[in-house]
Image (spheres, helix red, strand yellow):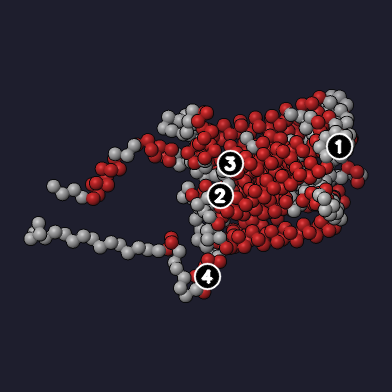
Amino acid sequence: MTVSTAELDDASESREPQHAARPALLGITAPSLDDPVMNVGADGFGGVHGKRARLPRTRAGMAFLLIVLTLLSTAIGIGMREPCFNSSWTGGGNQQYTHMCYTDIPFMYQGRGFSQGEVAYFSTNPNDYLEYPVITGAAMETAALLARHVPGDANNQGRWFYVFTTWFLLAFAAITVVALIGISGPRPWDAAMFAVAPGLMLNGTINWDLIAVGLAAVALFAWARRRPMLAGAFIGLGTAAKLYPALLLVSLVLVCWRAGKMKEWAQCLFGAVGAWLVVNLPFAVENWHSWVYFYTFNDKRGADWGSLWLFLEYSPLHMNFTYSQINTYFAVLLALSCVGVGLIAWLARNRPRVAQVAFLVAAAFILFNKVYSPQYVLWLIPLAVLARPRWRDFLIWQACEVLYYGAIWLYLVTLNTPERGLPQGGYDTAIAIHIGGTLFFVVQVIRDIFDTRRDPIRAGGHDDPGGGVLDGAPDVYGFRDVLEDVSPNAVAPEEDLQLEPEPEASQPTEATA
């Protein structure tokens, strides 16, 4: 009796456990089966994902669960402000530092004229000019309108100004996690890294950064859905809330050029410029001096909290820089960093993913900036989740941020009581850890770019789920292509090699049978 090889293959496949491929049926990567840290941690929560797992099976269900986690994390941070809230942030002395409940928000209510009815960007008093772009100013004005209707004095209204502002921030935090679910493709659970990030919990309501973070996340989601013009519009709106979303345009041009997708990048640029002009021109025309104050304020800013420049100033070297010197060095270092990221994108065997390049560019901007405030980590968390969704490296980086969060408030205690708090040397060490944690994650992303076996996305058989038109697109320009053109003995890349088909076995003749 003769049995064909095809029948043998079918028989062997039929004997495999039918539940082995169950997690793949949903097209979703289970974290406990993919991430080493989650795999170990799952032992305390019922074990790894299996065929009887009762997790949400739709993205809507996942979104609901992760929104709840995001709101809980942010709510914990809001609850940490309770000691300062009870005293309306007017307790004096070191209360807001010893209790680590400081936030910029309530001070702006009286400090920028909102309590007196001043309207953002329309005030002629230079003391009431806002050092924030117009989208952030609009959120502040809306919260102030609500707060002024609360009974009580300006201190009580300032407390409610904080409460109303947190409503906006909670909404944009939820928007961010939903956008991450949409961008992550087969790995929607990676968005949980944002939802439970210590950086979000501690820094979410220090300032208005979550507004820009949410708009930037929506821009990346639109790009992933191959809507470059819409992505550009949200980049423009995000830039009108904080400056950093404009860096997405730099990141996209570095990968779009290699893939020959400059038309799509131009559409994105057009949308960004158009949206930015629409929301900025009315205020610039109405009161130029008030509108431009955001840019002049940052131009004349010196070395500030958490920055490389303050680290050098406080270090034994005592290197002091004027604001104009820092402006020059920052511009040069950022330009060199962008060139370096561009070379990485060009030299890598496989084109980097959009999120990887975006994280590197944003990290360079923050590392060389005049200030690296605690809340700036919010800019990087969504990009880090998309660039390297690995819990071990993420938690190492976040641990550095938690340490710095405590250190800066303890150091500020010494400004009022020099005999208490963290000395200057200790704070300088915390800055080094703060910067070092970011550099650690940068190195991990670069290693993933040059060795795709380390990249959880590429190792899972995917190209760039958040890349939009770049996902699966062939390269048009790249260093590898140049080498292949100039080298007469170049070997074809592995994916281009075509093996010769094996000759079919000759059929037995009647004589041999």
Name the N-terminal-most of marks 3 and 4. 3
Q: Is residue 474 above or below residue 46?
A: below
Along the viewing direction, whichever of 31 and 273 lies nearer the viewer: 31
Name the N-terminal-most of marks 4 and 1. 1
* SS at mark 2 in the image: loop
| Contact check, label 2 and label 4, Cβ < 8 Å | no
Viewer-side label of 2, 1: 1
Give how far apart the Cα atoms at labels 1 and 3 are. Answer: 34 Å
* SS at mark 3 in the image: helix
Q: Label 1: few (<14), some or many (≥20) within 10 Å?
A: some
Give how far apart the Cα atoms at labels 2 and 3 are. Answer: 22 Å
The residue to which callout 1 is attached is 414
Name the N-terminal-most of marks 2 and 3. 3
Viewer-side label of 2, 4: 4
Which picture quadrant has residue 132? top right
Tell me the amino acid under the disc marked 1.
Thr
Give how far apart the Cα atoms at labels 3 and 4 are. Answer: 37 Å
Dot label at residue 466: 2
For the C terminus, which image quadrant? bottom left
The residue to which callout 3 is attached is 392
Give how far apart the Cα atoms at labels 4 and 1 are. Answer: 58 Å
Q: Is residue 288 visible?
A: no
Dot label at residue 483: 4
Give how far apart the Cα atoms at labels 2 and 1 are. Answer: 46 Å
Viewer-side label of 3, 4: 3
Name the N-terminal-most of marks 1 and 3. 3
